[in-house]
Image (cartoon, rainbow, N blue to C red):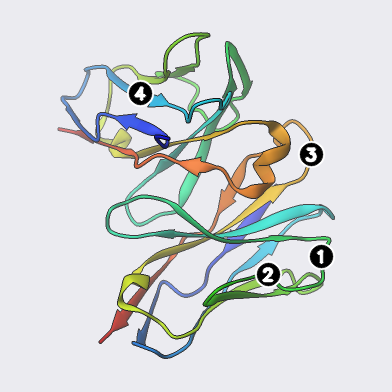
Amino acid sequence: AQTVTQSQPEMSVQEAETVTLSCTYDTSENNYYLFWYKQPPSRQMILVIRQEAYKQQNATENRFSVNFQKAAKSFSLKISDSQLGDTAMYFCAFMKQGGTSYGKLTFGQGTILTVHP
Amino acid sequence: NAGVMQNPRHLVRRRGQEARLRCSPMKGHSHVYWYRQLPEEGLKFMVYLQKENIIDESGMPKERFSAEFPKEGPSILRIQQVVRGDSAAYFCASSPLGTALNHGYTFGSGTRLTVV
């Protein structure tokens, strides 16, 4: 079974600054996908960024980028130029590739990020 | 193009009553996932359905919980004889094809169930 751990229950950052959210996972799989989801107070789950495990290049989406260290099973999210609208709960998630449980996401506990003006 | 629609958004039930949560997937999507989020926790997988088929129900409690995704109409998550511990937000997600799942599927806004 897979586990995902987010060791930072809460983080805060000043507007326009950079913040990094940590995520580690444990799996015996070699092929999988990793995701970061954002959950603002509206409760909507919004996909922020995804990473294929077979790709060495770190994914980027505008102000969001990841540092994927496969050997260390680490998948951190960096938010640059933080904006007030980034305030939300952030979840790291793992998806195994293939098999009967293909498509099932395993989530971490979440990190509450607050961006201060 | 409407997203994944869940209703009701809020549901209050007394202990012992039944709760029915509905999920209409995005148009053309034939895969539905249900997740539960307890307060201050991440989402936990419950069940994966395709039309008229339960593919993986490994996350469903053994009793009182059931799910269906009929050929026509929304997917339904049913909780019988609710207890206070069932209070949570229940999320549905949908995807068009199995191979698209690795792109991260689309979630609905969730149903918050409160058992009083």
User: Which residue is rendered at x = 81% and y = 54% of the image?
Assistant: A28
Relative image position of residue A33 (x, y in whole percent): 71, 54
Figure label count: 4
Which of the pair A85/A62 is nearer the observer?
A: A62
Q: Quarter-wise, where is residue B50 in the image?
A: top right
Q: Are marks 1 and 2 on the same chain?
A: yes
User: Which residue is rendered at x = 36% and y = 50% of the image?
Assistant: A44
Where disc 4 sits, the SS reads: strand
Host chain of mark 3: A
Q: Are marks 3 and 2 on the same chain?
A: yes
Of marks 3 and 1, which one's residue comes earlier in the chain? 1
Of marks 3 and 2, which one's residue comes earlier in the chain? 2
Host chain of mark 2: A
Compared to residue A50, the image places residue B84 above or below, namely above
Compared to residue A53, the image places residue B81 above or below, namely above
C-alpha gap between disc 4 and disc 1 = 37 Å
Is A114 placed left or right of B45 in the picture?
A: left
Is A52 placed left or right of A104 in the picture?
A: right
| Residue that carries the numbered disc 3 in the rendered image | A98
Q: Quarter-wise, where is residue B114 in the image?
A: top left
Q: Amino acid under label 1?
A: Lys
| Residue that carries the numbered disc 2 in the rendered image | A59
Where disc 2 sits, the SS reads: loop
Q: Which mark is residue B22?
A: 4
Is A13 placed left or right of B114 in the picture?
A: right
Q: Amino acid under label 3?
A: Gly
C-alpha gap between disc 3 and disc 2 = 21 Å
| Residue that carries the numbered disc 1 in the rendered image | A55
The quarter in which the C terminus of chain B is drawn is top left
